[in-house]
Amino acid sequence: MTAEAPQPPGSQLPEHPDFLWRNPQPKKNYDVVIVGGGGHGLATAHYLAKNHGITSVAVLEKGWLAGGNMARNTTLIRSNYLWDESANIYEHSLKLWEGLEEDLDYPILFSQRGVLNLAHSLQDVRDSVRRVEANKLNGIDAQWVDPDEVKKLCPVVNISEDIRYPVLGATYQPRAGIAKHDYVVWGFARRADTAGIDIIQNCEVTGFVTDGNTVTGVRTTRGDIGAGQVALCAAGHTTTLTDMLGFKTPVQSHPLQALVSELLEPVHPTVVMSNAIHVYVSQAHKGELVMGAGVDSYNGYGQRGAFHIIERQMAAAVELFPVFARAHLLRTWGGIVDVCPDASPIVGRTPYDNLFLNCGWGTGGFKATPGVGWCLADTIANDEPHPYLAPFGLDRFVTGALVDEHGAAAVAH
Amino acid sequence: MQLIECPWCGPREETEFHYGGQAHVAYPADPDALSDEDWAHYVFFRSNTKGRFAERWSHSAGCRRWFNAVRDTATYQFHSFYRVGEQRPATS
């Protein structure tokens, strides 16, 4: 048996890139104005240019490019959702992730290392097996694995029967994985910029210019910008925009905290999630253990949360991964997620004819980035919701056709 | 962790409390008269204020009673605590 020579951490990472996009002055008018320079906004811009040849597009970002949730997420990508509507959009997204490096001609370090969603109770087991079968019916790779197989896939998981929430098995999606979130942003931004799309930073939206049921322009800290169509991709801050427009959405903004450990040797080869004790863990390319928890209970915009949430999450992590007990916590942070009553996003039409909404992704926005960008670009180009987005309209809260992914989505919200 | 002041028990640690969302959402006075849209708004739609927000908390690990608070959702600072049925204090 020959062991590979040890590689210094980070040795496979590319060099730090040069400037990848221009920093233009906003023009007077654009065919499409996208509010929010995060992953969803940039992906939408990219596919507007690539799939539809629409390049008179501005992406407005109040801070710096992707300095919000795109810089604050835990980078997990999977499509093992229960309901057909969710499976369609997340699987579409996963397929795009699989070819994204070629499409963007940029490294994103997409690593399909698989995700385990642990089951800790008989009810968890039943729900998990049901979800595996639903995934298979939707053509999504999924397996039910027993505790010994969990141990083979991720040797540091504690499968002892004596812990408070023993591992009774897990669902396994081999095609799931992680990507390098910064590179994803930079790749999309570079491509959109090359296509002629203006990415305008330090440009906060302060209001809208409307004419009846039409939005004709966007008021910003860098002046008024005329718009043929407008798409809101502002994640946790969407309701501050819709409040300016005078209509309501049923989303609530909550802090979602994450943290990383110091750099460690490779010990964790896959992604492990546990809904019941709520912790999820992967090991970043450089070696940090990346962990997330559930959302903090209260509404918040502060990009931080309460310490007891981290404490609870750490207690769960150490019981499940005893080997982590001596790892040092390097840093913690919080993003702001917009959570819907049915734990599914809201994408589509609004009371304004030419204004499209994209919000409510809760804790699941990162994995959807290319998929929602593709479908929202299609929606804007054809002025008609893409079939994968049609079930996620704002009107479902009146019709009652909810896509209730609470628990079913293998993560608590 | 911050202290939250239960109007009955006084200041206690945040972990003793449960969050209940927006305060002062009254049950419809005439439920039969509501359209589907009205019902949707009553059941699902809440304000998502950035700034001072009147909200409900339950002292779930203490007296188990509900009360209201005004808290700033950008800074997380509490500005006032008051009992159910009392008017929201003027905190601008």
Image (tube, coloured by chain):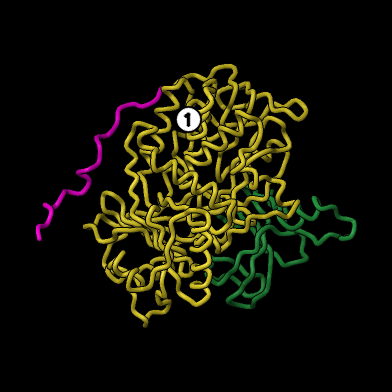
- Give the residue at the far bottom of this rendering: A162
Judge whether residue A14 is colored magenta: yes
Query: Considering only vertical position in the picture, is A149 above or below A205?
Result: below
Where does the image place residue A380, in percent across and percent down from the top left?
Answer: 61, 31
Secondary structure character of the magenta stretch overall: loop
Judge by depth and name the residue closer to the eye, A222 or A34.
A34
Residue extent of the magenta highlight = A1-23
Q: How many marks?
A: 1
Where does the image place residue A170, in percent across and percent down from the top left?
Answer: 42, 68
Query: Considering only vertical position in the picture, is A196 above or below B91?
Result: above
Where does the image place residue A394, in percent across and percent down from the top left?
Answer: 69, 45
Where does the image place residue A286, in percent across and percent down from the top left?
Answer: 26, 49
Judge by depth and name the residue closer to the eye, A193 or B26.
A193
* Chain A: colour as depicted: yellow
Amino acid carrying mark 1 in the image: His
Judge whether residue A88 is colored magenta: no
Question: Is B22 left, or right, of A192 in this rendering?
Answer: right
Q: Residue at x 70, y 64 (%)?
A: B82
Question: Is A288 left, or right, of A3 in this rendering?
Answer: right
Q: Residue at x 25, y 61 (%)?
A: A267
Q: Residue at x 45, y 61 (%)?
A: A293
Question: Is B90 left, or right, of A81 in this rendering?
Answer: right
Residue A313 position by quadrant: bottom left
Q: Is residue A62 visible?
A: no
Q: Residue at x 76, y 58 (%)?
A: B25
Query: SS class of the residue under badge 1?
Result: helix
Q: Which chain identifier belongs to the green chain?
A: B
Q: Is residue A64 visible?
A: yes
**Residue under mark 1: which chain is it in?**
A
Residue B68 position by quadrant: bottom right
Query: Considering only vertical position in the picture, is A411 above or below A385?
Result: below
The residue under label 1 is A46
